[in-house]
Amino acid sequence: MAKRVALYLRSSKDRHDVSVESQRRELTQYAADQGDIIVAEFVDKVESAKTANRPAFQEMMAEVKSPNCRFQKILCYDTSRFSRRQYDAQFYKHLLKKHCIELVFYKLPKTDPLMDSVLESLMEIFDEFHSHKSKMDGLRGMRENVKKGWRAGGRAPTGYRLSRTVVGTRDGEPICKSKLEPDPKMFGVVQKYLKLRLQGISRIKAAEEAKLSLAKTSLIYLEESALTYAGHTVWNRHNETIDGKYVGGKRYRDRKEWVIQRNTHMAMISEEEAELLLSVREQERRSRKRKRVSHYLLSGILVCRCGSNMIGESGFYRCQKRCGNRGIKKETIEKIVVEQVFERIHTPEMLRKLKQQIENEQKKSSVRDLNQEIRREAKRIEKQIDELIDLLHQMQNKRPILERIDALEEDRKALLDRMNGSEEKAKSIILSISMKTLKHFLKEYRESFDQGDVERKKGLLRNCIAKAELDGNTLKINPSYANITGVSWRPQPDSNRCCRRERAVS
């Protein structure tokens, strides 16, 4: 039976790679021999198969997932056209299988389904091995070029330009290698900027004085390339990228992995100045990573009556918007809040209610989980019954099919009976929490609070308090047990006007 077919064609930078035109010609002939109809074509020219982020490939996969997909089969020249990463190959082959799309490799000999899958897996391993080997050969060649004083590729940094030299021929075409030489227009400008930075002048001001029109990120990159501006060729500095992201989340490798060939081109600054710029950049990175520690325990918790946060300032908490609500001393308000948390909220009465709510929530959750599992199983059985009924019309001897349908129907009824008794079953698996356990937990909680640093205390308080509102002489505390139990809570007023408790509601 004729099928609607899509062609996927890909070529890489390799001179010996099979051209897109050659792939198209052979695949078109193969589709015609099979009686298939080509309805779509997806082409990635000069794209690496080490990543799945190829424009045409992703467009094809998006159509596969679309309900309006035009094709039933995808034709590829060989396994390396599809992917050179075994993980990607398996992932997207599974996606195609899920959407009932057949994938055929023209150059893969067909034997039987079992051997075909084995052969495909072996070819994917060889494709990935070839990719790694090509990469290592390329890196080895780049390293050798750098050792000889040549560039390893890429464009010239700002302030320089590339000077190309023909060093030989290959297949009648010239082989060119490059070095850096000063750019007459930008060399002095970048040099002036770097000198100003070495004097401690800020980036923006130094760029203005040097008349260097670059974005802040580009200015930072200039400083991070200081060794290049000191006249050295630096290679293997950047980390490898996979799908557009740096491996390990770091842009640069460790300094010991860099390959530095010294004195390969005219320098703008000395090596000592370059090292100074790099050390300043490293200090900036470290300072950016430092976490600012606030010694105000209630920051982010305490709010003013106007709704604004109360912020720590000179030993006091004051309204951020200065609405007129008076401030309060740091030690005073923090002591009151901590005492209220441990003396008013964590009472035996609240513990009993908390225990009951936890058990009720466990019971509901257990019943819900059991019922979901039963419904999934019942749905699967109903689907099997529907498929057998459709098959029944095509069979002459209907007895075996009818017996199978009866057996499945009995299973479905048994599942419904299980659902009716799920509440009783759920009771047997509920975790029993004793008052002794809860009291022990609260004791450890208080000890952990007293022994912790400011950040730990703030974290523990946030688990207990949703908000503390200061209105003149009145402090209203809204507990937040939902963070621990998953139970919804609603505030209810207490007889003590200086504190408000909350009670759990189902």
Image: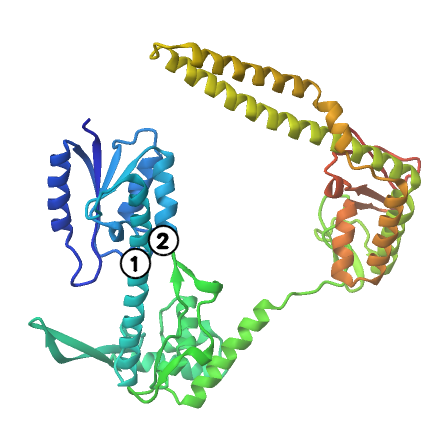
Vertically, is 255 above or below 68? below
Specify the color scheme: rainbow
Query: Who is closer to the viewer here, 72 or 399?
Result: 399
Q: Where is residue 326 in the image (x, y as percent from the top left)?
A: 82, 52
Q: Residue 207: image x %, image y %?
A: 41, 74
Tag in front: 1 or 2: 1
* Residue 227 seen anywhere in this rendered image of the structure: yes
Q: Is residue 382 left or right of residue 36?
A: right
Is residue 278 positioned above or below 22 on the image? below
Q: Which of marks 1 and 2 is nearer the N terminus?
A: 2
Q: Nearer the viewer, residue 419 or 453?
A: 419
Q: Report helix, strand or loop for mark 2.
A: helix
Along the horizontal axis of the image, is 70 left or right of 362? left
Q: Which amino acid does label 1 sit on?
A: Phe
- Which residue corresponds to the image point at 70% horizontal and 31% vertical from the top-left? 365
- The quadrant in which the N terminus is found is top left
Asked whether residue 502 appears in the rendered view, the answer is: no
Q: Quadrant of the C terminus?
A: top right
Which residue is depicted at the point 55% across and 21% down? 378
At horizontal 17% and vertical 32% (from top left) the residue drawn is 36
- Mark carried by residue 126: 1
SS under mark 1? helix
Mark 2 belongs to which amino acid? Gln
Sort mark 1 into few (<14), some (14-19) or many (20+) by Cα contacts within 10 Å: some
Which disc, if any, is residue 86? 2
Q: In which quarter of the image is residue 50?
A: bottom left
Residue 440 numbered mark, or none: none
